[in-house]
Amino acid sequence: ADGTGRTGAESGTDSRTDSTPFLPLSVHHHRPTMHPLSGWCLLLLFSMGVQGAPETPSAIPEHVHLSYPGEPGSMTVTWTTWVPARSEVQFGMQLSGPLPLRAQGTHTPFVDGGVQRRKLYIHRVTLRKLLPGVQYVYRCGSAQGWSHRFRFKALKKGVHWSPRLAVFGDMGADNAKALPRLRRDTQQGMYDAILHVGDFAYNMDQDNARVGDRFMQLIEPVAASLPYMTCPGNHEQRYNFSNYKARFSMPGDNEGLWYSWDLGPAHIISFSTEVYFFLQYGRHLVQKQFRWLENDLQKANKNRAARPWIITMGHRPMYCSNADLDDCTMYESKVRRGLRGKYGLEDLFYKHGVDLELWAHEHSYERLWPIYNYEVFNGSLHQPYTRPRGPVHIITGSAGCEERLTPFVIKPRPWSAVRVKEYGYTRMHILNGTHLHIQQVSDDQDGKIVDDFWLVRPLHGRMMYH
Ligand SMILES: [Fe+2]
């Protein structure tokens, strides 16, 4: 019992339709058989535990989630309390009984930018020397209050294993359609990590950041068991992305705006498309990020024999065929071409032979043919994704939010291979250095796979496209 009852009851969204039995319901169910007073007492106790926690100052950890800090054999646990408290994680390999291992960290106060200036204490503890592939049990907190127990599997080491990920963007605190199935997938051990490609909660800053609290609590059953890796989207922009920067703990020293990490045979680069749009937070960030990307891609290519896949994730796509006026519908989109022809990412990613580019922002799923500068570069007529001669783009922003789905223009573009206007998320299986499998899961069709393809790139000539 990893506290799923509490989380579900608090969420107040579609996850209520999940089959998890909630504590308050079962209390109600048994009440007639008990003494009336004991029933009320229990109900009072539970309702205090369920509803009282966020507003009464408490040192009981909430919003527990994991992230991978980039160094093999480690995992970071992040959580929130409402009063200052020590930051400790107790962990071990036994499912029950005492947790013999200890790790300490720090907490930092986060003051939301809303009028109420709500104050959260964000705790970060990194566990190290974890045994690769081994399951751990942990709880976090302090003597003032402990979390429930959660489980996670330490990431395997090296390049010779086959990571499985769930990938999606644009998931809100309301209408989070993909979440119940993601929860079940997680409980079944289907993934090694989650990639959330920007746009959280809608919005984390709303209602003096209470919407952010609700969202973090909602994803806890997934994010406390799997590294939940992120990049910022446009919905995070308030107060200079402060909720995003404070609540997540991504690798590197750049508050999670851009970073990269290695996972099995892949090098994964996360970056901010938002630097091109919210120039009020610093024009220099466009250049700063571009230089970082260039440098990171150069390093990744030097290491390409060992880690052949280079995968990027950023929120706003370069291309899309949706029926709106977003940047990706423009011929010269900013992400693709940069600002006044400078710092465009298409040339950079093409030049360094990026294999796969993951995007979101459009609330739909779209797969592109291998593409560069509007030209389709399929490997061959019958095997377009085998030896592709340009990067492959996937836009997966249909996990569900209050803005619902985005329609497509009626006539697909010549570079568009598959379009799905249904709620869902993407499964990515990096089988080895040459084969990568992508599936799109539809939540509108009860988990049906609505797109399925293999990306195959032989090791030879992997650096650039010719
Ligand atoms: Fe967005």
Image (cartoon, rainbow, N blue to C red):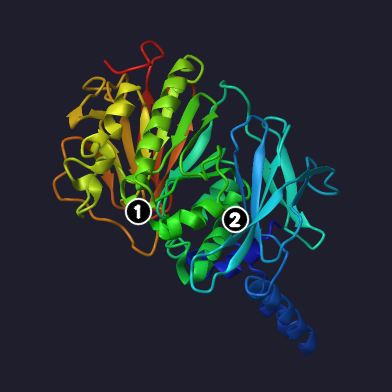
Q: Residue at x 67, y 35 (%)?
A: 74
Circle 1: is it few (<14), some (14-19), or many (20+) Cα within 10 Å?
few
Mark 2 is on which residue type?
Answer: Glu
> Which residue is labeled 2 in the image?
220
Q: In front here: 127 or 37?
A: 127
Tell me the CA gap for discs 2 and 1. 33 Å
> Which disc, if any, is residue 280?
1
Element type at marker 2?
helix
Q: Residue at x 74, y 48 (%)?
A: 138
Residue 82 drawn at (x, y percent): 67, 66
Q: In front here: 253 or 74?
A: 253
Q: Residue at x 51, y 23 (%)?
A: 265
Mark 1 is on which residue type?
Answer: Gln
Using residue 432 as the reference point, say whether residue 353 is left or right of it.
left
Could you tell me which quadrant the N terminus lies in?
A: bottom right
The answer, for residue 450, to whether it is visible in the render is no
Residue 241 drawn at (x, y percent): 45, 54
Q: Is residue 430 above or below residue 204?
A: above
Using residue 95 as the reference point, say whether residue 13 is left or right of it.
left
